[in-house]
Image (cartoon, grey):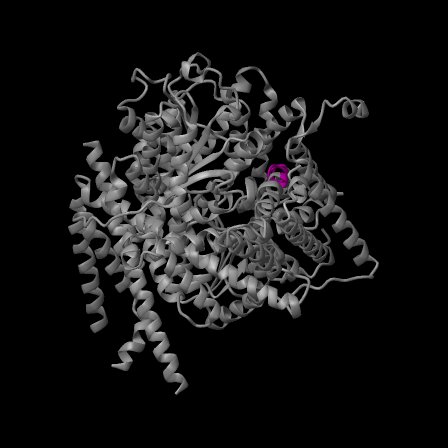
Amino acid sequence: MITEVLLYGEISFKEGYAFPFTLFIITLIVFGLTLMLIKRNIFIPRIRRLPAIDAIDEAIGRATEMGRPVHYCIGLGDLVSGYDVPQTIASLSILRHVARRCAEYDTPLIVTFRWPGLQLIATEVVRQAYLEAGKPEKFKPENVIWVTSRQFAFASGVMGIIQREKPAASFLLGYFAAESLLIAESGNLIGAIQVAGTANSYQIPFFVAACDYTLISEELMTAGAYISKDPHQIGTVFSQDVLRIISIAILLIGAILMSFGLKTVVDLIRM
Amino acid sequence: MSEAIIRLQEVDPRILYLLMFIVISIPLLRPIGLPISISQETKSLYDFIEKNVKPGSVVVMDSDMSPSTAVECLPQFIAVTRHLAEKGARIIFIASRAVGVQFIEITMKEVFGGGPEHPDYGKKFVNLGYRPGGSVGLRSFAEDVYYMKTDVYGNDLTKLPIMEGVKNAADFTLYCVATGSAVDGYVMLITDPYGTPVGGLCTAVLASRVYPYWPEKVVGFLIGLRGGAEYELLIGKPGRAVAAMDAQSLGHMLIIVFVVLGNIGYFYSSRRRKQ
Amino acid sequence: MSKVYARDIPLAITTIVAIFIILDGVLKWPEYNAVARSVTQAASVIASLTILISVIALARVHAYRVIRRRPGWIESSLLLTVMFITILVGFGYWAIGILPGENELLSDLYDAFLTPGDATIFSLLCFFIASAAYRAFRARNFESALLLASGIIVMLGRIPLGELVWGGFPSLAFWLLNIPNKAGARVIMISATLATVALYIRTLLGYERGWMGRVREGE
Amino acid sequence: MKETIITLIAAGMTLALFSYLWRENRAYRIAEHLYIGVAAGYGFVYSMDAIRRIVEKPLSEGRYEWYIPIILGLLFLFYFSRKYFWVYRYPMAITVGAGIGVSLVYMLKTRFIEQIRYTIVPLVTGDPMTTFNNIVLVFGVATALSYFFASAEHKGVLGVSARIGRYVLMIAFGASFGVTVMARISLLIGRLQFLFFTEPAYYMIPVAIALLAYAIYREHMQKKK
């Protein structure tokens, strides 16, 4: 039945989506191979140190010394629509790390976010961290705050929370839009150490300008792997680098061929 | 004296805030009238419409505006609609977010002088209202224009003369979207599958993200208030955007002056530290 | 056993749903596409319902504050009051057949509170962008000097007044936006997508479980 | 009458929220909580309306399978159960799976392949300016991409390329920052136009100034003590 359908062309690729799909499959294969090499201990990739991640630990330490809380904002992102999904997932794995540290140091942690669905997830992530640190009684569910789903109402709420609670460290990691600078400048007004990160290209400049450390685009997504040091996670980061080499090669070869008037590469990747 | 120069790098931000209020307010109450030149992004959208939009061409005007982005996008939306109406295009208004519908009504009133009661309604222009469902909804609309069934006033779409011969996104000459969030989705779901170019009516903040698509997929785009002012000048009808440009000039200059002062203070103090 | 229900089946559901919709994105197969469209719409219905939990949690936090007279309880009681009024207005009219889209009182509330709120908070950015530029645009090293220079040139190039200072600013600003900025924006997109694909693969294979919330010992 | 009340509330909200620039204060706090309260209620009503828009038609046609997503969505309420909290993962799993599925391949196409495709430009052309621009574009993208190499230390060739890449990114960030200033000033212009030119919004301005002056005076007196 399947062969019939395939042979007589009931199903076909949508125009222009054959190559993207192939690329996805290639990534899967590269990842599988890397994982195999890691499992057999033949090759173990290492991840470059990210200064911003070390800064997170330092900032939590400073907050502890000053006896002031830590603020963590997951941002505007949700888990349903488009390209904020990966940033939210990445932010949640960093949150796990931050919550664990805060639990160990007995530093209050305030978590803010916009998408209501995160109420469940973020609360559980933080609760789990306190359980692991052996201090479940210190966990305060009311400190995981859904501000509201409206973008600027959310921003005003977070700005108010920052001014009232005066956190010594503020982490803004995830998907951010225009409120990036509103929240970051509010943090500056009270002199918090800020580590920010987003993959939203037109908000990165504001984080670079207003925060002490910035995780730029990809760094946000690999931070989770860097923290966990889990071989599977590091394996995907390595396959990401393999894909990067492929794309740089496609770009340079394509441009050189293009200089001679050959459009081979462009035609290939258009498929 | 030197202490004062060094302190230039740590002026209380509230002084800056107060000056900003003053500098923006004055030209709004008493305009100066500085000249404005036309940028290439604006010109390319204007040229595309001049060249490709014939009487009867179908153009979608998508209002993805919210009250906060409308300051920038509404003058653009009105100016482009005015241009399209002059060219005799069939204009389909649609809103990608619920709060965008009110701006379609304002635009219809300003350009055509009326809404659904206007004699040309349903012939020259139609208001489909809010299209829910984010990118999923956009995909359905692109596949089948009649997925909405009726316009916002309950008229059956299949019976309106304006929809004659329109099936899917491939039948549009241009898909203009006034937005402050992203054009990526429109390029992804309209241009890539159907080949219909996108015209961007963008807030200035979005501009840097539209450049990668320009001019291949987004044929032209207007950047913020200035884009609107330029388009108003291109079609020869200066409006609210032109008036606000003076305040823009002064606001920018204030920031530049403060950046320069901050650097003088920084430069001076770091030189003294070296000595 | 409960580990299977609590962890493995949800992970498998994620993977199956994702692959189902990925195939819909690349294949032209009308029957399949139609089913997939219903599935995505159903998923958005499910997602919309998460707001139930958040509204309950928000009401709980503020009600606690009001009952115990904790600091800020007056503001909290205001918040609860207007929230319930808005919900009552919305559903009260809905009950007698007036949908939220046609509910005039609801749109009055919108005009009175949300429109000015959105616009004002958004416009605070005008002040914050000024103070951020003032603080960050310092020529501390070569990198920040580049940031400073390109920022100032583009600002001068965008305003009529800058043109009066030097006629070359607009074209220089245009070049900066069109070439280096294009390159930068493209790289951010490309690299973010690379990382996204890697992250999605991790999620689909069940290695990235941040979204699952509580993960118990051994899960 | 109704219009007047709405405008006065709107102007009051505007000025109270602006007062954040001076410092966090009671006026801001009240406006903030009103704003969040209405936004939360409004968001709730509209989420329910969004569900109605999707399910109303199929349900009226007797396709009762559309009750399934609603029931699945209500499973989120298990979150409040101590024992069966994990049930909420089922609807969440569907949501996350759909989120990933919808974006993955389209994202690869539009935000990856197409971006590379349009960066593939001839390095040598007849026009020297175009040649220069193309070279800057191609090598700018290549070097900036190399900056994100995670599994190798930035040394040697990669070190040089990554540093150049970072410079490219900084120029891009500066330009993007500069072009945004106009957008932000526009927002303030919009707000001030509302305050200055809408009857009777401008009556609130002297009230706000008087309140602010009183607050500053009181703060000053407290400091003296």
**In-front residue for pair C219/C62:** C219
Image quadrant occupied by the N terminus of chain A: top right
Q: Quadrant of residue B159?
A: top left
Q: For the magenta stretch, what is the residue range?
A: D91-105
Q: Is residue C41 magenta?
A: no
**Can you name the residue that lies furthest to the top here?**
B159
Q: Is residue C194 left or right of residue B130?
A: right
Q: Position of residue D164 (x, y in %)?
A: 56, 64
Magenta portion: prevailing SS class: helix
Above-or-below relation of D207 to B130: below
Instruction: Tell me the residue at 16%/49% (across/down).
Output: B30
- How many numbered callouts? 0
Q: Position of residue B166 (x, y in %)?
A: 49, 19
**In-front residue for pair B168/C40:** B168
Q: Is residue C173 left or right of residue D6?
A: right
Query: Is residue C68 visible from the viewing direction of this image?
Result: no
Q: Quadrant of residue B17?
A: bottom left
Above-or-below relation of C191 to A52: above
**Can you name the residue that lies furthest to the front here?**
D126
**Can you name the residue that lies furthest to the bottom here?**
B275
Q: Is residue D94 magenta?
A: yes
Q: Position of residue C114 (x, y in %)?
A: 34, 40
Q: Position of residue D126 (x, y in %)?
A: 53, 50
Instruction: Tell me the residue at 58%/33% (across/down).
Output: C43
Instruction: Tell me the residue at 52%/60% (across/down).
Output: D168
**In-front residue for pair D201/A27:** A27
**In-front residue for pair D153/A127:** D153
Query: Is residue B120 visible from the viewing direction of this image?
Result: yes
